[in-house]
Amino acid sequence: MHIQRAASFLLLAVLLAGCRNPYLVAQRFEDSSRKYGQMVRWHEYEKACDTFAAPSIREDCLMRARAAEGVSMADYRVKGTEVDREKGTATVRAEIDYYILPSARLKTIEDLQQWRYEPVEGSEVWRIVTPLPAFR
């Protein structure tokens, strides 16, 4: 009886692992977008691009990361998030407060991020498909 129950549980686990679990998709998105936001907040722009940028925008993202060297971050706020688990897409609206020395003028920019759930090396991960905003 215990062997049959264990075998049933194992079969269920294998079947679920092969399917796109909507809860897992949403959880992975929350983790990815939170880590990306932390990297941007702490000026780890190149790391954010290397870790999360889709290959199609990676170079543009890195170019903007290098251009943002003198940018000082004051705040990073997520204003809204929409996740379509079935399509594997998401949109994040974030506001970033920043300044560029020697000016002390605080500027605010809206960062509209588009994300896509993509297969990578036998797994699926969330990739951002819009580069860092252009800080001016």
Image (cartoon, grey):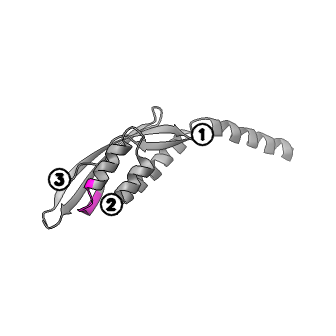
Find residue 4 and report its horizontal and vertical position in percent.
Answer: 84, 41
104 drawn magenta: no
**Distance from the alpha carbon under mark 2 to that under mark 3:** 17 Å
Residue at the (14%, 67%) spot, across then down: 102
Q: For numbered disc 3, what is the local secondary structure?
A: loop
- Tell me which numbered mark, 1 or 2, is placed earlier along the sequence: 2
Tag 3–tag 1 contact (CB < 8 Å): no
Q: Is residue 92 visible?
A: no
Mark 2 crowdedness (10 Å alpha carbons): few <14, some 14-19, many ≥20: some
State which region is magenta.
67-76
Marks 1 and 2, how far apart in space?
A: 30 Å
Residue designated by label 3: 136
The residue to which callout 1 is attached is 122
The mark nearer the N terminus, 2 or 3, is 2
Residue located at (34% from left, 50% from top): 62
Q: Residue furthest top?
A: 87
- Estimate the x, y position of residue 8 in percent, counting from the top left: 77, 39
Q: Name which residue type carries label 2.
A: Arg
The dominant secondary structure in magenta is: strand
Q: Nearer the viewer, residue 62 or 39?
A: 62
For residue 96, which quarter of the picture? bottom left
